[in-house]
Amino acid sequence: MSLPDWRWGYLCENRTLGATTLRTLRLGNLTAERARDKVQANLADLERMVRFNAEHCIGVLRVGQQLVPFGSHPAFPYDWAEEHGAAMRQIGVLAAGLSICLTMHPGQFVQPGSTDPGVVERSLAELRYSARVLSLLNPGDGVMVLHGPAPGGDREAAAERFIAALAGETEVLRYLALENDERWWSVRELLPVAERLGVPVVADTLHHGWNDGGWTLREALEAASPTWGGRRQKVHLSSQAEGGRPGAHAELVDPADLEQLLAAGSHLRLDVMVEAKAKELAVLPLVGETARRAGVR
């Protein structure tokens, strides 16, 4: 078996280093001094994780949404992009030089297709914040992953609201990628929405297992592949947490789930984001296993 042309990644924190990009505070305690302390600590740990990744053949890293706590909120007390932009650019240059892809994933509360104008306004603010972070980090292959629109009873209407809200957001669309979910949007159903916005589709293997839209995983990966326009295709890999709700992530990746992805996508050029609670401790064995199979020592 030849080594797949894959890069591996993990989420926001590194247990080995005790590092995180998720430091935050409460809105009621938001002051310029406290915010600066959190941002500077998050950025310092982001740099540490980038260097760790390069040393351990891990090519993708998700940056926490709290890199700048409340960075999208109108109450944020200073111009964070102006004050921290130079440090972010420096980390971005480092990551690019080490071939590390930086990504973000705004949370489920981000719903630009909502029927509530307040939710739409806050969602767009969070997406603009995320795009600004990625722009300052300058990740040429970075993406901002967002789940498809919450239907709220009418899937087509939700999709139309979602598309209308995002249509003029040039900087957001530059980084945006849409992800399937375990309940509402399979890869098959999400592709037309992504096509209308001109953005790629991230296939999540765990969500696909719960909501496949009538496609095999191989069919879903191959259908999503052209949406990336020659860039590395982003894929999410995780295993179901025993006893958890559908879609809940386990600590590690079940070997059977790795085998399934290898069988379905070893011929594709992938960035595989491992959404496991053990962070890099779940990724390191996968890096070693795929290398071992290829006879790399």
Image (cartoon, grey):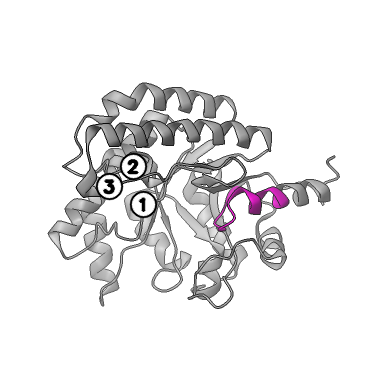
Query: Where 23 falls versus 248 (above or below)?
Result: above
Q: CA distance from mark 3 to mark 1?
A: 7 Å
Q: Position of residue 99 (x, y in %)?
A: 59, 31
* Quarter of the image with the C terminus in it: top right
Residue 142 is labelled as: none
Q: Is there CB contact under 8 Å for labels 1 and 2?
A: yes
> At 70% from the left edge and 52% from the top edge, which residue is drawn?
286
Kindly identify which numbered label has been placed on residue 130: 2
Residue 280 inside the magenta-drawn segment = yes
Task: Please state the horizontal and vertical placement of residue 291, each as a whole percent of the image.
Answer: 78, 45
Q: Is 34 one of the magenta-colored residues? A: no
- Between discs 1 and 2, the one toward the N terminus: 1
Q: Nearer the viewer, residue 286 or 195?
A: 286
Q: Which residue is mark 3?
A: 126
Mark 3 vs mark 2, CA separation in Å: 6 Å
232, 48: nearer the viewer: 48
Q: Secondary structure at mark 3?
A: helix
Asked if disc 3 and disc 1 are in contact, CB closer than 8 Å, the reply is yes
Q: Are marks 3 and 2 in contact (CB under 8 Å)?
A: yes
Amino acid residing under circle 1: Pro
> At x 19% / y 56%, what residue is drawn?
120
Q: Seen in the image, is 294 located left or right of residue 223?
A: right
Range of magenta residues: 271-286
For the residue marked with disc 3, what is the amino acid?
Glu
* Residue type marked 2: Ser
Q: Is residue 227 visible?
A: yes
Q: Which residue is mark 1?
A: 106
